[in-house]
Image: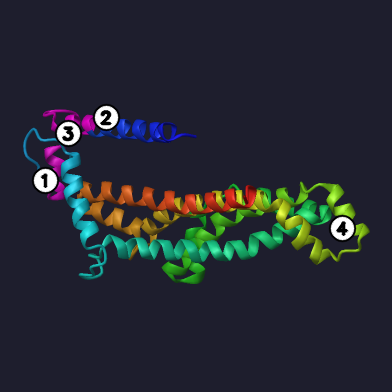
């Protein structure tokens, strides 16, 4: 692919971004529109809204506030006033811890299910019942039993992360070509060595795809979980800024959530490409 071919998607992306920003700016500069904040609601919430002004901030206001967050992301002025870098750090730590525990549980169990039809048939009803349950439905039970909001959020991340990895691992292991396994048995390769040297390399792309799906779901769920438990985290930051009627900060938080989610996804996507096409 030549340089022009590589630049064309970037240029198109920049055109789309520019069109979006122009449309956003024009919409927020319109007066008397449907986005005006109701005066009675504004008075009730203590908001100061100029008559006829749009309730939605424009890109210039968001950019100015974004720069202030980027300039000092780790300030700590008390329980309800921490920098967005600190809030993201809490959320990322919770996600990575719950996700790591899910990896330790889901991948070995997925290997067992994929290698043993008996275990697969025995556990399948439980997996099919528990998999569709919303992770947030576990939050009240976790809070009641664990009695710690931070540990409860980590538990919810574990629950939502474990199923895609478990199902993909079991599928990838079960789909390994029988000929390879038969050759390993003919050579009297022990079962544990077959799992590491034959099954794992063959199933690795499918396993990593499950891990990639899981990290995306985990990052989605942590925002909602932190809105429920409060205290710290980017989800709590969003909810707290909404309570303060700071729509600018809500938009900025959404932007940061998207960027961090993209980075987490791209790291696992790169690992998947490396395993699939090691050259």
The structure residue drawn at horizontal position 93% and vertical position 58%, both measured from the top left corner, is: 186
- Farthest residue to the front: give it: 2
Query: How far apart are the two marked residues, 1 and 2, measured between alpha carbons?
Result: 35 Å
The structure residue drawn at horizontal position 9% and vertical position 46%, both measured from the top left corner, is: 48
Q: Position of residue 235 (x, y in %)?
A: 35, 56
Query: How far apart are the two marked residues, 4 and 2, measured between alpha carbons?
Result: 58 Å
Query: With respect to residue 115, does 53 lie above or below?
Result: above
Specify which label sits upstream in the sequence, 3 or 1.
Answer: 3
Query: How far apart are the two marked residues, 3 and 1, measured between alpha carbons?
Result: 21 Å
Q: Secondary structure at mark 1?
A: helix
Q: Is residue 276 left or right of residue 53?
A: right
Specify which label sits upstream in the sequence, 4 or 2.
Answer: 2
Mark 3 vs mark 2, foreground winner is 2
Specify which label sits upstream in the sequence, 1 or 4.
Answer: 1
Q: Residue 82 falls in which quadrant of the image? A: bottom left
Q: Is residue 4 magenta?
A: no
Q: Which residue is mark 4?
A: 184
Q: Which residue is mark 3?
A: 28
Q: Is residue 153 in view from this perspective?
A: no
Q: Is residue 141 left or right of residue 224?
A: right
Which mark identifies residue 19? 2
Q: Position of residue 29 (x, y in %)?
A: 13, 32
Residue range of the region highlighted in magenta in the rendering: 22-47
Q: Which residue is mark 1?
A: 43
The structure residue drawn at horizontal position 50% and vertical position 59%, both measured from the top left corner, is: 157
Query: How far apart are the two marked residues, 1 and 4, measured between alpha carbons?
Result: 75 Å
Query: How far apart are the two marked residues, 3 and 4, measured between alpha carbons?
Result: 66 Å
Specify which label sits upstream in the sequence, 3 or 4.
Answer: 3
């Amino acid at each position: 692919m030549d340089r022009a071919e590589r630049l064309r998607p970037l240029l198109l992306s920049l055109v789309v971004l520019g069109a979006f920003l122009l449309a956003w700016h024009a919409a927020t500069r319109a007066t008397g529109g449907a986005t005006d904040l109701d005066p009675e609601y504004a008075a009730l919430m203590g908001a100061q809204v100029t008559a006829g002004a749009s309730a939605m901030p424009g890109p210039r206001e968001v950019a100015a506030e974004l720069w202030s967050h980027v300039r000092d992301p780790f300030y700590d002025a008390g329980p309800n006033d921490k920098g967005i870098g600190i809030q993201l750090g809490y959320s990322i730590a919770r996600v990575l811890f719950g996700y790591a525990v899910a990896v330790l549980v889901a991948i070995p169990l997925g290997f067992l299910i994929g290698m043993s039809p008996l275990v697969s048939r025995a556990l399948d009803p439980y997996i099919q019942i528990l998999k569709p349950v919303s992770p947030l439905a576990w939050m009240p039970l976790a809070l009641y039993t664990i009695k710690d909001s931070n540990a409860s959020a980590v538990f919810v991340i574990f629950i939502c992360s474990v199923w895609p990895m478990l199902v993909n691992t079991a599928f990838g292991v079960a789909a390994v070509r029988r000929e390879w396994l038969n050759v390993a048995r003919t050579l009297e390769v022990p079962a544990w060595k077959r799992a590491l040297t034959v099954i794992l390399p063959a199933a690795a792309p499918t396993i990593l795809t499950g891990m990639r799906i899981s990290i995306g779901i985990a990052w989605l769920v942590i925002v909602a979980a932190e809105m429920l438990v409060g205290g710290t985290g980017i989800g709590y930051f969003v909810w707290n800024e909404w309570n303060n009627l700071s729509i600018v900060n809500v938009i900025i938080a959404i932007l940061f959530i998207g960027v961090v989610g993209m980075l987490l996804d791209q790291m696992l996507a790169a690992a998947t490409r490396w395993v699939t096409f090691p050259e």
